[in-house]
């Protein structure tokens, strides 16, 4: 499944469990990344719009349920969906971009607390319904999730091989949907003024800057200052699973990659003579 999904902005997906209990139902598939990102995938065969809306609402309820979990409760829930129970960090430990265990736990805990996740609803025969999708997303004001509605078309050849082709029909980016204020024990949600919104950002982008600030509060400003120096030279930051420094040249089909900064703080220059270097 991870090789089929188009999630470049989130990096490598590592299968964690299936049928994960949440108290609001069971998550079909749950994935993690080496930097502590959480990805939920619901797989459905849909034939009508009403069923699609119900499935989308259910997936977002899973996000709401996960935001109430501490790391230990989340790990326990994931373990119940594993054939052979393993600690969450053991799933990602051997990946070259894995954080230290303490940082990984902190990252997962922060993502749970903020509802910062990627929710993918994957099915066959899906057609987009943007108005209903928008209403559902706006009803979950406090969560910082990214949502994707993905159609998976499949074909079988004469040899019995299956070709699966994903197509993202609808996708949101992470925006600040509201400000939750707690006063005298009562929580209220206030919309963010338009002037205060700097536009959408990807979920992994926000996560990257959070991780840098955790290492050193002055680091995000220093990196942005460095990027501003490179900008007149045509070098730009492509922020996905890591911050990649790239340059477009007229005689090249693909951008030149000068190197990247990973969420764990490692800085890797591109290998001279390698692909796109």
Image (spheres, helix red, strand yellow):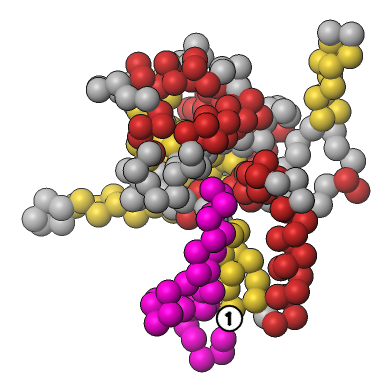
Residue 251 % position (x, y): 51, 91
Residue 206 seen anywhere in this rendered image of the structure: no
Q: Quadrant of residue 234?
A: bottom right
Q: Residue at x 42, y 17 (%)?
A: 77
Q: Is residue 144 left or right of residue 170?
A: right
Q: Quadrant of residue 226?
A: bottom right
Q: Quadrant of residue 60?
A: top right
Looking at the image, the residue that sits furthest to the top is: 185
Sort mark 1 into few (<14), some (14-19) or many (20+) by Cα contacts within 10 Å.
some
Q: What are the residue bounds of the magenta stretch?
A: 249-277
User: What kind of secondary structure does the magenta stretch mostly adopt?
Assistant: loop
Q: Residue at x 35, y 32 (%)?
A: 90
Q: Which residue is mark 1?
A: 248
Give the tally of numbered discs.
1
Residue 260 % position (x, y): 54, 64
> Closer to the camera, 213 or 118?
213
Q: Is residue 216 left or right of residue 33?
A: right
212 lies above or below 271: above
Quadrant assignment for the N terminus? top left
120 lies above or below 158: above
Q: Is residue 80 left or right of residue 158?
A: right
> Closer to the camera, 216 or 127?
216
Which secondary structure lies at badge 1?
A: loop
209 lies above or below 22: below
Residue 139 % position (x, y): 70, 27
Q: Is residue 158 left or right of residue 179?
A: left
Q: Residue at x 82, y 30 (%)?
A: 179
Q: Is residue 237 magenta?
A: no
Residue 256 seen anywhere in this rendered image of the structure: yes
Q: Is residue 273 magenta?
A: yes
Looking at the image, the residue that sits furthest to the left is: 159
Q: Residue at x 59, y 78 (%)?
A: 247
């Amino acid at each position: 499944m991870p090789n089929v999904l188009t999630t470049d902005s989130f990096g490598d997906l590592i299968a964690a469990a299936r049928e994960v209990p949440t108290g609001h139902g069971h998550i079909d598939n749950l994935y993690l990344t080496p930097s502590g990102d959480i990805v939920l995938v619901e797989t459905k065969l849909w034939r009508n719009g009403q069923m699609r809306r119900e499935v989308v609402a259910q997936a977002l309820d899973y996000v709401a349920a996960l935001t109430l979990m501490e790391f230990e409760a989340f790990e326990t829930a994931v373990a119940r969906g594993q054939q052979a129970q393993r600690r969450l960090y053991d799933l990602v430990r051997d990946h070259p971009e894995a954080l230290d265990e303490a940082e990984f736990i902190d990252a997962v805990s922060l993502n749970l607390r903020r509802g910062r996740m990627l929710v993918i609803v994957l099915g066959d025969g899906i057609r987009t319904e943007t108005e209903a999708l928008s209403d559902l997303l706006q009803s979950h004001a406090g969560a910082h999730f990214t949502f994707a509605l993905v159609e998976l078309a499949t074909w079988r050849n004469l040899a019995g091989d299956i070709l699966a082709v994903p197509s993202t029909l609808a996708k949101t980016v992470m925006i600040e949907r509201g400000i939750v204020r707690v006063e005298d024990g009562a929580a209220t949600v206030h919309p963010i003024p338009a002037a205060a919104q700097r536009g959408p950002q990807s979920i992994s982008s926000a996560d990257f800057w959070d991780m840098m600030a955790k290492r050193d509060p002055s680091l995000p400003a220093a990196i942005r200052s460095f990027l501003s120096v490179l900008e007149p030279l045509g070098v730009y930051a492509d922020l996905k699973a890591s911050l990649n420094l790239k340059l477009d040249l007229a005689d090249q089909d693909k951008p030149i990659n000068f190197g990247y900064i990973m969420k764990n703080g490692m800085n890797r220059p591109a290998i001279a003579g390698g692909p796109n270097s």
